[in-house]
Amino acid sequence: MTRTLLLTGGCGFIGSNFVRFVLANRPDWRIINLDVLSYSGNPENLADLEGDPRYRFVKGDICDMDTVAPLMEEADGVVHMAAESHVDRSIMDSKPFVVSNVLGTQTLLDAARRAKGGKGAGRFVLVSTDEVYGSLPLERPDLRFTEETPLQPNSPYAASKTGADLLARAAFHTFGMDVVTTRCSNNFGPYQFPEKVIPLFVTNLMENQQVPLYGDGKNVRDWIHVDDHCEGVLTVLEKGRAGEVYNIGGDNERSNLELTHAILDIMGKGKDMIRPVQDRLGHDRRYAIDASKMANELGWRPSRSAWPDALESTVRWYVDNRSWWQRVKSGAYREYYAKQYGAKG
Ligand code: NAD
Ligand code: DAU
């Protein structure tokens, strides 16, 4: 069956990988990518798809009902990824997070429900995050987040994503919408904006700069390769049950110190390249995902996230694509979309 999928945030890190993943694995699907091109949205990530009849880019804001509503008329499925995504930025200025993550999600849910004379735009997958659960103590390695773990977000980013998550829940319970939510752990892979720890550290090292490690470096994240996440979202879109939440994780817990040492080893750099810096405010100690519901119910398991191979291939991507991240770090990528789409960025 031909499907027209409306994807939001497709010019970002996970979104651009998701576009490629879906086009490669579902040959009869079309994707409409709605993205406002914020600082982290980079259409260069998908430049090779320009002119592809199965792919259409629409520059626009998910908060703008006039933009969103006509796109919902064309869609028979929605994957909502657009968001302000970086915790440190949310600590510096929370407002854009509330606007895009909460108001934007509500606008999309309303438009999806009203589309096609009230028949709706098909299944709506909200890409949420494991950060909605808050933090686990390092002293209890036996604990992991399940879908039943209470929501206790700690950063303005996580709180805004929790707002979106709860709006999706309400849309199912109040209006009977076909909404499914995913909560995934930390992604790594190609095209990640170099403010996030892995591309920041790799690209700093390539420029012979030190890497800023927050606090004592003992904070733990559960790392998943972006393609495993993309496959998980597609699985939920096709096979998940309406109204349900599904955790997605890489079963790959590492402290930031372990991660940093692994990157230094891969890149042949010494520990003197670590610069301990002041900790992030309210820094969550540990995230760890129990993804057994995905495995038992939908047959999904992470198959591309195991280290050292997955980390090495990711580091190699940044080494091989120096011009991509240099343009992003210098802001030069904005010229591209100013020329293509008349935006200033
Ligand atoms: P990203 O910052 O790389 O990309 C976000 C994209 O959303 C950008 O292209 C941006 O232009 C777009 N966007 C932002 N506000 C918008 C708006 N108002 N209207 C239209 N487009 C807008 O983020 P990412 O890391 O790719 O994350 C994508 C999604 O996955 C987010 O919802 C994030 O919360 C979630 N998530 C991320 C991770 C991770 O490790 N990166 C893990 C779990 C969940
Ligand atoms: O868990 C899922 C979340 O993972 C997503 O919802 C977010 O969108 C995504 O940004 C990510 O959040 P984190 O805050 O965990 O990712 P970040 O890459 O910013 O940081 C990872 C860890 O590395 C964290 O413990 C903080 C630390 N860190 C980060 C930076 C940027 C450093 O030590 N130094 C740094 O310079």
Image (spheres, rainbow, N blue to C red):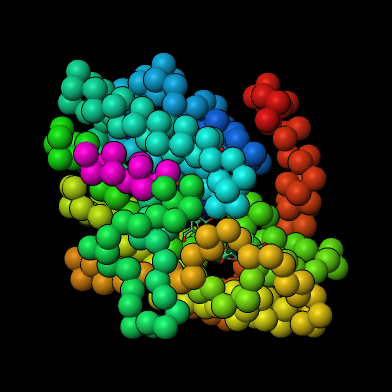
Residue at horizontal 31%, vertical 56%? Answer: 151
Does the segment drawn in magenta span residue 284?
no
Q: Magenta segment, which residues?
A: 160-170
In which quarter of the view is residue 108 placed?
Answer: top left
| The one of 302 and 159 positioned closer to us in this rendering | 159
Q: Position of residue 192 (x, y in %)?
A: 61, 55
| The one of 279 and 72 positioned closer to us in this rendering | 279
Residue at horizontal 18%, vertical 22%? Answer: 118
| The one of 97 and 53 positioned closer to us in this rendering | 97
139 sits to left or right of 272: left
Indicate the quadrant of ligand 2 in the picture.
bottom right
75 sits to left or right of 9: left
| Residue lying furthest right | 208
Q: Position of residue 161 (x, y in %)?
A: 40, 46
Residue at horizontal 53%, vertical 35%? Answer: 96
Residue 343 against residue 246 in the figure, above or below: above
Which quadrant, please, contains the C terminus? top right
Q: Position of residue 79 (x, y in %)?
A: 37, 42
Q: Position of residue 197 (x, y in %)?
A: 63, 63
